[in-house]
């Protein structure tokens, strides 16, 4: 008997048969405190399809549902391939019909022969292909595979969404008819080539941006990709400019605790949204530059939380004791530092003291978009808890450890008991960061599962010398200065941003010599060939690629 040939996924189709319809109510996701509509069951009876989807089908409206995502279809032949490619998946049995939470199943239709804008009729319903599916972290959790969601778009096995042009009834066994094909050159698979894989192909992105039939999700994504391409082209054609500093006005200053105050800075005009995890650089009148996490706001008006440090060199002292409402201050680049790990099933925030400010926007947004998270927060006493309304809003997702009551955060236990596919974010004093590093290693967590955010770091140490490879010039770095400071004093142009070892902007390549690494922005592999010039120190003599 000759071997059975796999189907030709590129084969055109004009008619198909509806093999299954599936719907579900929102249900708890396995081992998480969030709900999902992915666990869909077959509907053998005829079902009414409205503009928002099949009757009795519920969606997590953060990522799914709505006019552009009313109905989802998935090609059933993909499940065989997934099982073969991931035989050790924790939940291998989920690779079967309904595994992706699809509403419709048919025999022939797939990402390589379905095009954006296609109009199809099933029973009394007229549908139009509106979007390729953008997979979220729930697919990782559904199948027990870290990073699985990205595999779906890499292999173009995501399925696609429909909008409903004519409401009506449909049922299993109904004929599926291709009524009109508007964009025969743009299959779902080809669209994903430029949305996800070849994202710098400006010519193709511009072509895609002219397709009116796309839903808003892809229209917004294309706009962002085109803007990124334009910015990269402009950067190539223009010389690097110095950091731009703009005047902001302090419009509100409020005491949060005996040692922490909130500061709201504003400038005229309409601001743009910023992602969680950004920080602002402030230039003080004495020339000091300080970076602080943004608690809330946008590019034109934002709130910071700042602690008055006893050993302050003038930064927090000036802001707390001299700066008044109505005063002006210079603000530089707003920069992202704490990442958004959208493919994690669960998020664990570990914060101490003022370190909470690095994560407040994350926790607020994660709650809004139905991410599973817990915030562990260590304080010296209840009166030292800032931004209480924001924390109260998080409810049981916040666990507070009050030192004055003898409560202690056991970081190793927290990490040991973590949910599968968790990502950890840590910000606090250095001893807390060190504890997270030790604990993560002890429970077998990899470097790419933890983000460390230091809000203060010791940059002093033994003096060392640095030789610039290209010129042979030697610089001396004394005990109280950083390599970044000394290079700038020598007239060298070195990029930087956070200047606390978190972001990696100030990275310098090391050709020879030993480095005392500080900060969290470099991987173990990178530490063998680079250093963070804002915090790390040489041991004796270094040669750097500069």
Image: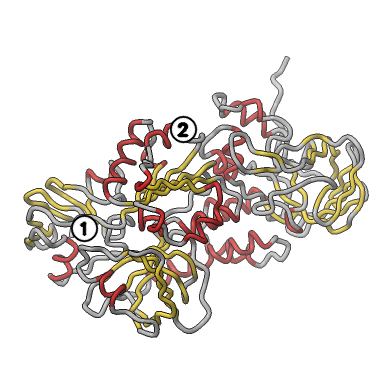
Q: Which mark is residue 8?
A: none
User: How many callouts does the rendering have?
Assistant: 2
153, 115: nearer the viewer: 153
Question: Mark 1 to mark 2: distance in Å?
Answer: 36 Å
Position of residue 346 relative to residue 417, above or below, is below
Q: Quadrant of residue 33?
A: top right
Q: Which residue is found at the position 38% from the left and 42% from the top? A: 407
Residue 424 percent location from the top left of the image: 43, 44
Q: Nearer the viewer, residue 260 or 210?
A: 260
Residue 311 seen: yes
Q: In the image, what residue occupies the spot 84% across and 50% down?
A: 178
**Extreme residue toward the top, this view:** 1
Position of residue 373 in the picture relative to residue 213 (left or right):
left
Q: Quadrant of residue 338?
A: bottom left
Q: In which quadrant is the C terminus drawn?
A: bottom left
x, y (%) of residue 306?
A: 35, 66
Check disc 1 and report the residue beneath it: 533
- Disc 1 crowd, CA 10 A, few/some/many (<14, 14-19, 20+): many
Residue 187 shows in the view = no
- Between 373 and 101, which is closer to the camera in this rendering? 373
14 shown above or below 497 = above
Q: For the residue labelled by badge 1, is the local secondary structure a helix, a strand or a loop? A: loop
Which label lies toward us, 1 or 2?
Answer: 2
Determine whether the residue tagged by mark 2 lies in a helix, strand or loop.
loop
Residue at image point 20% right, 55% down: 458
Q: Quadrant of residue 231?
A: bottom left
Q: Which residue is mark 2?
A: 417
Q: Position of residue 527 (x, y in %)?
A: 24, 45
- Tell me the quadrant of the picture where the N terminus can be found: top right
Q: Earlier in the sequence, mark 1 or mark 2?
A: 2
């Amino acid at each position: 008997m000759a071997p059975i040939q796999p189907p030709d996924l590129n084969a055109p189709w004009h008619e198909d048969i509806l093999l299954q319809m599936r719907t579900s109510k929102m249900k708890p996701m396995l081992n998480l405190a969030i709900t999902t509509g992915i666990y869909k069951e077959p509907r053998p009876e005829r079902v009414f399809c409205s503009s928002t989807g099949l009757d009795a089908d519920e969606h997590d409206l953060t990522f799914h549902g709505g006019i552009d995502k009313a109905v989802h279809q998935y090609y059933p032949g993909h499940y065989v391939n997934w099982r073969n490619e991931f035989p050790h998946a924790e939940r291998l049995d989920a690779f079967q019909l309904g595994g992706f939470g699809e509403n419709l199943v048919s025999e022939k239709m797939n990402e390589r022969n379905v095009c954006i804008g296609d109009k199809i009729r099933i029973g009394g319903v007229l549908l139009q292909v509106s979007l390729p599916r953008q997979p979220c972290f729930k697919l990782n959790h559904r199948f027990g595979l870290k990073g699985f969601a990205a595999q779906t778009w890499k292999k173009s096995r995501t399925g696609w969404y429909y909008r409903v042009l004519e409401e009506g009834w449909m049922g299993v066994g109904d004929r599926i008819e291709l009524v009109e094909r508007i964009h025969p050159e743009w299959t779902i698979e080809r669209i994903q080539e430029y949305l996800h894989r070849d994202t710098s192909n400006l010519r193709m992105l511009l072509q895609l941006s002219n397709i009116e039939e796309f839903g808003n999700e892809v229209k917004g994504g294309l706009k962002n990709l085109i803007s990124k391409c334009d910015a990269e082209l402009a950067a190539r054609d223009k010389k690097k400019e110095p950091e731009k500093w703009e005047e902001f006005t302090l419009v509100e200053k409020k005491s949060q605790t005996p040692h922490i105050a909130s500061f709201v800075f504003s400038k005229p005009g309409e601001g743009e949204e910023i992602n969680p995890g950004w920080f602002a650089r402030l230039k003080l009148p004495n020339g000091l530059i300080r970076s602080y996490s943004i608690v809330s706001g946008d590019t034109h008006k934002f709130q910071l939380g700042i602690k008055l440090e006893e050993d302050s060199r003038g930064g927090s002292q000036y802001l707390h004791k001299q700066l008044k409402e109505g005063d002006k201050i210079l603000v530089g680049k707003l920069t992202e530092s704490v990442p958004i790990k959208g493919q994690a099933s669960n998020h664990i925030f570990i914060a101490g003291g003022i370190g909470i400010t690095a994560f407040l926007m994350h926790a607020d947004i994660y709650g809004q978009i139905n991410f599973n998270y817990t915030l562990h927060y260590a304080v010296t006493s209840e009166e030292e808890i800032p931004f209480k309304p924001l924390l109260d809003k998080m409810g049981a997702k916040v666990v507070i450890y009050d030192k004055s009551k003898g409560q202690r955060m056991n970081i190793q236990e927290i990490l040991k008991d973590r949910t599968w596919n968790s990502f950890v974010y840590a910000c606090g004093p250095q001893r807390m960061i060190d504890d997270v590093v030790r604990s993560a290693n002890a429970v077998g967590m990899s470097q790419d599962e933890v983000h460390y955010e230091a809000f203060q770091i010791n940059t002093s140490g033994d003096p060392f010398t640095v030789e610039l490879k290209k010129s042979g010039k030697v610089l001396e770095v004394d005990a109280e200065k950083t390599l970044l400071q000394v290079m700038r004093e020598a007239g060298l142009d070195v990029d930087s941003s956070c200047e606390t070892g978190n972001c990696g902007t100030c990275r310098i390549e090391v050709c020879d010599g030993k480095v005392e690494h500080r900060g969290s922005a470099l991987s173990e592999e990178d530490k063998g060939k680079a250093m963070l010039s804002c915090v790390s120190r040489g041991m004796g003599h270094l040669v750097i690629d500069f």
